[in-house]
Amino acid sequence: MRLDGRGVTHAEHRDRHPAQADDAHTFTAAGSSGKVGPNLDQLPAYAQKAGQPLDPYTLGAITSPPPKYVPPGFPTNVMPTTFGSTLKPQELADLVAFLTQKS
């Protein structure tokens, strides 16, 4: 599966950024089943509960955690707060596009 933008595959992204979302979140498209953070397959529902469009909700959750809505049972202080400054704008755009893709 390819990320938008530069056409980076999930495997290539994982190789460049090991131990990020794979171990923390469940996300079917990535083959990950982490349980530390919320299930990313449910991002559209989370954005709706936050009253935000999907893309801005997802970007904000990555760059300025915690987002407006965090599912019950998950802590609000676990997501790293550095992704907004450590990922390049294109990497952020690619990641948001990958996470918000339609199945």
Image (tube, rainbow, N blue to C red):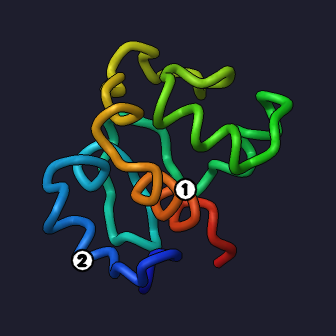
Q: Residue at x 52, y 51 (%)?
A: 40
* Residue type at the position of mark 1: Val
Q: Residues within 10 Å of mark 1 (few under 14, many from 20)?
A: many
Q: Is residue 47 left or right of residue 5?
A: right
Q: Quadrant of residue 35?
A: top left
Checking the image for residue 35, the label placed there is none
Circle 1 sits in a helix, a strand or a loop, which is it? helix
- In this view, the residue farthest toward the front is 89
Q: Residue at x 74, y 45 (%)?
A: 45
Q: Is residue 42 left or right of residue 89?
A: right
Give the Cα distance between marks 1 and 2. 16 Å
Q: Residues within 10 Å of mark 2 (few under 14, many from 20)?
A: some
Q: Residue at x 21, y 65 (%)?
A: 14
Residue 58 percent across, percent down from the top left: 60, 43
Front position in the image: 68 or 9? 9
Q: Residue at x 24, y 77 (%)?
A: 11
Circle 2 sits in a helix, a strand or a loop, which is it? helix
* Residue type at the position of mark 2: Ala
Which residue, given by chain and number where applicable, does mark 1 sit on? 96
Front position in the image: 86 or 36? 86
**How many numbered marks are there?**
2
Which residue, given by chain and number where applicable, does mark 2 sit on? 11
